[in-house]
Image: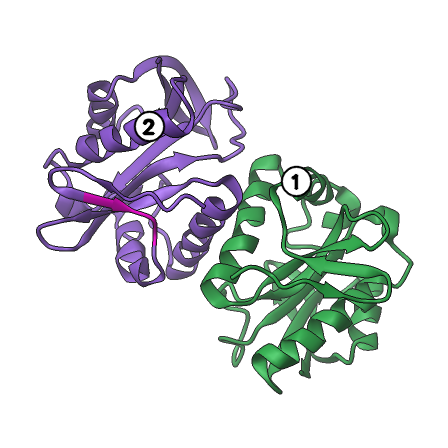
Amino acid sequence: MTAPRLETGRLVLRAITPADFPAFAAMSADPVVRRFSGDGKPRSEEESWSSFIMIAGHWQMTGYGSWAIAEKAGGSFIGEVGFMDRKRDRGPGLAGVPEMGWGLIPTVFGKGYATEAVNAALVWGRGRFGPARVIALTTADNTASIRVAEKCGFREFHRGLSAGRPRVFFDRIL
Amino acid sequence: MDNSVLETERLLIRPPRAEDFPAYAAMWADPDVTRFINGAPLSAEDAWAKFMRGFGHWQLAGYGFWAVIEKSTGLRVGETGFLDVHRDIAPSLDGIPEIGWAFAKAAQGKGYATEAVRAALAWGEQRFGKVRFACIIAPQNAPSLNVAAKTGFKEVARTTYKGEPTVMLYREP
């Protein structure tokens, strides 16, 4: 399956398309965006393509995954949000627990879009998974994302290393 | 997505399916398979990520890798297909359809790769037209260099990819 279309007041969440790739790659190469993600390093185009095709494959294999975020006015790619399970070892008790993630391009920071998109994905997730546990990881100094997590009902349950960097582990029940 | 199924004398070459994963993960965990391709065997989680990417590639590029099935046993013995990697490599492969293949150790030495790659190339000439195709192969991977030579590829450059020496080959129309 591919990502179903969801709408919020200002945003559309939809499946990624090949036309999104240049904007996705630019976001993934942006040091401001990447500072808080993964290993913290900007991604090459090749690394971005690998992540991009993973998004589509994840929906096909698991029936859930990440959406492209677009403004209703405009429609071009401004970020991503969704649920992933890459079967990585993230810590005790976390096997099979979907992990939420989100990211936006810097030109739309500060508008409350991440909160709006995460809330829409959570509503969909409740329908998909039922009242199940989901987690979200942020780097410990990513105050903007920590605020999004808190506004969306997540609470901190752990601090520790993930992919070699200090993270805050959040969870909530859908 | 193109659902083409290719058939040769001994092989069925079909799009991947979810139930292929155990055979897929076993093949990519075998150091004899990965020593010339990824350099190191894939963990189950890395194989799962690669497997998912394969499905995403079909969806977003419209083509990808097929599973190669041995008709006599029904076993998945390998894979071949076209890939768009956006490789960080010089000379650039942008705009040149790239083909690749990998076969399980037990299936090597039977001419399966040549048989499958020939079928894939014939499909590629329909899909992309009579154009140049490319592949990259580790210089010490004699069996794959032999497959490439038998299917019409010629070396055009010696370069590096992810810090390792690699041979770039073209097959001209």
Front residue (pair A113, B161): A113
Q: Where is residue A102 in the image (x, y as percent from the top left)?
A: 71, 61
Q: Nearer the viewer, residue B150 or A141?
A: B150
Task: Determine the image quadrant of residue B65.
Answer: top left
Magenta stretch: helix, strand or loop mostly: strand
Residue drawn at the location 87% of the way across and 46% of the way down? A107
Which residue occupies the extreme right position in the image? A111
Is residue A169 at all visible to an observer of this figure?
A: no
Question: For chain B, what colour was chosen?
Answer: purple
Residue density around tag 1, few if under 14, some if 14–19, many if 20 or more, within 10 Å: few
Residue range highlighted in magenta = B12-16
Residue depicted at x 54% and y 32%:
B86
Left-right relation of A52 to B73: right
Q: Name the residue under label 2.
A: B138
Q: Answer whether residue B30 is visible to the viewer in this image.
A: yes
From the rendered image, report the letter of the chain displayed in green. A
Position above or below: A114 against A124? above
Question: Are labels 1 and 2 on one chain?
Answer: no
Measuring from the top left, give residue A153's x and y in whole percent: 78, 80
Specify the quadrant of the image occupied by residue A129.
bottom right
Q: Does residue B15 show up magenta in the picture?
A: yes
- Left/right of residue B121 with respect to residue B61 in the rendered view: left
